[in-house]
């Protein structure tokens, strides 16, 4: 359900809503429906859904409920004005062409007395009916946005904006074709209920381009599924890597020169294509270890473990130096053979080749993998992109820009200007899709999430106008103050952890921070007392300015997220003071700040689901970090919060560390939360 508002924002209400024009096709006039919606005789699920949205939102805008009719064989369509939704007989007779569009591109066209809302539709796999192109849905959404002023800023029942007008019309010369810039955004979707599932199930996600407009299964790590150690190691240990003189199934490392391994990989890829997918990923296991059998070792000079023993250091150093000249040709040979075989049997399909860790740089032996192979780059720097150009038919990318597992934690991760520059850079370099993986801190990063979604549709949009549109559409009369609130965060991030222009597309902030700059140090650096006081004043002013229950509700979400920043930083300041001087007074101050932060944590994790569903999108992801307790991410991160909540509450919040893992790769805060204050000093 959307909220009906009368706020006359010029950014949100197009002129066509506000006044009639003789050169327009009337759809609603003076609060009465002037047009009929026409559907195909047997519409598919998503065309019917799109028509439902059209009826619902035009009625919310105007008060008029349009009639929906289905075409009948041999029967005439109702006289105009009409809105033809999807691939109707009317559209076929009018020869509405979509030939120049791809993915879920769409077209809005007026011809005679009919508004055609139509797009490329090719969706549905064996497991997900919302994966694939739903261009007709996009056409309806684009009409509601551009000609009715509707917006979907946040997920949930309170996240939309619907202006009111007694009339709706479109220009009679309307011919609007829209081609989204990216085919999909995989991984976590801040607009969907389950952020780890395929994105795009919700209307909000589709509207803001967090969706899959191709039937793709990215992500790599095919080896686990094609040759699982649990199924094969006992009977076929020779399928698995020879490590230090013995075959082992631990880690699911494979003997990549074994012919049966190739056969099983082909079988797995074919199974995925048979499920209805068009793009299927192919890649080695995580934490790859090379097989040391004679046949594998003779294939290349890839010797990371030998390099590590000789030089020490980090994987990243090896990847940027020795790996480029000694790539694992054994993997590339295998993956090329698998790709060639499955593509020969599946014309028109795509293989997505995971370019990650050992396969970050391309093969020296294979000049090209072919036009139907797409490289999934996990390193998005210019040097990697240039190295792969000409060797594959296109790129997709995986980023850590927003990942809360990484050192930045629950914080503001990127500025609006950085997001715009990064998306534009990738689009200009031929990227077809990108996985961005935001985790849902809407109260701190909402404007950036919305901006990212709009950029995935059109990278040329105006950044400042989009941020202002979000803040006014969400916070109403408090919009300008909240815009200033967010700008403080962005300025601090840019000042404390700047990103060089040459690193604009890589994950420099979340993956290349110096090791001493821990999550705790980042908060201390970004939020000194004067900055916290400024943010507090802005948020208090926004609360006074907010005039509606809706705008006050969203200010409250930003308050909850800001209180996390404030109470955490105050606790860390007190901890530093106690470390410098362990006096009773400093210990008492430290205990007080820890208690205050734990009280805050208890409040957040105990919020009622009815409340969080309406007012706290991303609540589960937020809670998981708050109580992560340094546990393995398989449990603390990837397990849904609903499955952990009861256990966590039973054990209690106090004394728990936050975040995942405890190495420099992860975001975590341990002390002072885990200190024992039960005894007198």
Image (tube, rainbow, N blue to C red):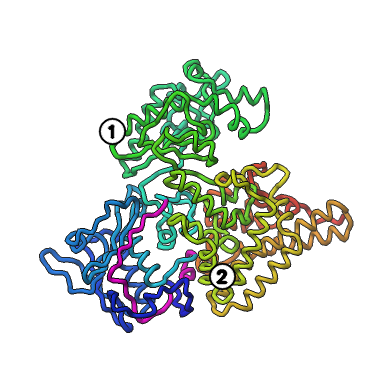
Image height check: is 148 above or below 501?
Answer: below
Q: Which of the labelled discs sits on residue 554, or is there none?
A: 2
The image shows residue 447 at horizontal and vertical percentages of 55, 62
- Of residue 427 and residue 87, the one placed in the foreground of this image is 427
In the displayed structure image, the side of residue 637 where residue 200 appears, left or right: left
Name the residue located 32 percent from the left edge and 64 percent from the top edge: 50
Q: Can residue 53 be seen from the camera position used here? A: yes
The image shows residue 634 at horizontal and vertical percentages of 55, 45
- Please tell me whether mark 1 sits on a helix, a strand or a loop: helix
Mark 2 Cα shell of 10 Å, populated few (<14), some (14-19), many (≥20): many
The image shows residue 88 at horizontal and vertical percentages of 21, 62
Q: Quadrant of residue 217?
A: top left
Q: Quadrant of the C terminus?
A: bottom right
- Mark 1 lies on residue: 345
Of the numbered discs 1 and 2, the one sitting upstream in the chain is 1
- Please tell me whether mark 2 sits on a helix, a strand or a loop: helix
In the displayed structure image, the side of residue 525 where residue 145 appears, left or right: left
Name the residue located 67 percent from the left edge and 42 percent from the top edge: 664
Image height check: is 605 above or below 319?
Answer: below
- Of residue 323 and residue 59, the one placed in the foreground of this image is 323
Image height check: is 32 above or below 280?
Answer: below
Task: Specify whether residue 175 is painted magenta.
Answer: yes
In the image, farthest residue toward the left: 74
Magenta portion: prevailing SS class: loop
Residue numbers of the magenta segment: 154-181
Mark 1 Cα shell of 10 Å, populated few (<14), some (14-19), many (≥20): few
- Of residue 352 and residue 678, the one placed in the foreground of this image is 352
Q: Quadrant of the N terminus?
A: bottom left
Task: Specify whether residue 171 is painted magenta.
Answer: yes
Name the residue located 27 percent from the left edge and 54 percent from the top edge: 98
């Amino acid at each position: 359900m959307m909220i009906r508002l009368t706020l006359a924002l010029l950014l949100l209400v197009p002129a066509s809503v506000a006044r009639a024009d003789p050169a327009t096709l009337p759809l609603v006039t003076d609060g009465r429906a002037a047009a009929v919606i026409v559907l195909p005789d047997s519409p598919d699920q998503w065309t019917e859904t799109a028509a439902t949205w059209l009826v619902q939102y035009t009625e919310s805008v105007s008060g008029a409920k349009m009639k929906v009719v289905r075409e009948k064989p041999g029967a005439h369509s109702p006289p105009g004005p009409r809105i033809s939704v999807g691939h109707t007989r009317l559209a076929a007779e009018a020869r509405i062409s979509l030939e120049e569009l791809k993915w879920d591109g769409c077209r809005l066209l007026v011809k005679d007395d009919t508004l055609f809302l139509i797009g490329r539709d090719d969706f549905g796999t064996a497991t997900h009916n919302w994966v694939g192109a739903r261009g007709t849905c996009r056409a309806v959404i684009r009409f509601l946005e551009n000609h009715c002023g509707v917006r979907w800023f946040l997920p949930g029942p309170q996240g939309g904006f619907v202006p009111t007008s007694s009339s709706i019309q479109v220009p009679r010369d309307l011919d609007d074709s829209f081609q989204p810039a990216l085919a999909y955004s995989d991984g976590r979707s801040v607009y969907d209920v389950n952020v780890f599932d395929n994105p795009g199930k919700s209307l909000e996600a589709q509207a803001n381009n967090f969706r899959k407009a191709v039937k793709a299964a990215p992500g790599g790590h095919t080896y686990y599924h094609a040759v699982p150690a649990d199924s094969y190691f006992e009977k076929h240990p020779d399928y698995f890597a020879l490590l230090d003189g013995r075959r082992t199934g631990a880690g699911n490392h494979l003997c990549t020169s074994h012919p049966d391994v190739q056969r099983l990989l082909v079988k797995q890829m074919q199974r995925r294509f048979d499920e209805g997918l068009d793009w299927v990923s192919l890649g080695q296991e995580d934490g790859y270890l090379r097989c040391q059998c004679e046949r594998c070792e003779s294939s290349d000079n890839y010797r990371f473990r030998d390099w590590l023993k000789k030089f020490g250091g980090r994987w990243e150093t090896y990847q940027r130096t020795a790996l480029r000249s000694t790539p694992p040709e054994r993997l590339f040979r295998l993956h090329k053979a698998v790709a060639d075989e499955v593509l020969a049997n599946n014309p028109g399909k795509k293989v997505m080749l995971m370019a990650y860790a050992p396969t970050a740089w391309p093969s020296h032996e294979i000049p090209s993998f072919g036009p139907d192979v797409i490289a999934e780059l996990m390193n998005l720097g210019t040097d990697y992109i240039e190295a792969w150009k000409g060797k594959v038919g296109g790129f997709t990318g995986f980023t850590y820009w927003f990942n809360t597992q990484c050192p930045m934690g629950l914080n503001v991760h990127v500025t609006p200007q950085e997001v715009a520059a990064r998306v534009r850079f990738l689009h200009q370099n031929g990227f077809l899709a990108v996985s961005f993986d935001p985790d849902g801190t809407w109260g701190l990063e909402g404007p950036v999430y919305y901006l990212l979604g709009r950029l995935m549709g059109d990278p040329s949009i105006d950044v400042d106008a989009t941020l202002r549109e979000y803040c006014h559409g969400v916070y109403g009369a408090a919009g300008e103050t909240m815009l200033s609130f967010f700008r403080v965060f962005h300025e601090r991030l840019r000042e404390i952890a700047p990103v060089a222009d040459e690193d604009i597309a890589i994950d420099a902030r979340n993956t290349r921070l110096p090791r001493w700059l821990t999550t705790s140090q980042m908060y201390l650096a970004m939020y000194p007392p004067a900055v916290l006081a400024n943010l507090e004043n802005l948020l208090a002013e926004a609360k006074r300015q907010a005039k509606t229950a809706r705008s006050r509700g969203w200010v409250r979400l930003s308050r909850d997220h800001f209180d996390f920043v404030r109470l955490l930083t105050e606790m860390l300041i007190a901890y530093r003071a106690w470390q410098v001087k362990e006096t009773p007074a400093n210990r008492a101050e430290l205990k007080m700040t820890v208690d205050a932060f734990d009280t805050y944590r208890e409040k957040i994790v105990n919020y009622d689901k009815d409340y969080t569903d309406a007012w706290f999108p991303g609540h589960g992801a937020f809670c998981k970090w708050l109580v992560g307790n340094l546990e393995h991410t398989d449990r603390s991160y990837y397990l849904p919060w609903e499955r952990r909540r009861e256990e966590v509450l039973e054990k209690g919040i106090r004394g728990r560390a936050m975040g995942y893992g405890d190495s420099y790769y992860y975001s975590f805060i341990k002390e002072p939360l885990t200190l024992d204050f039960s005894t007198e000093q």
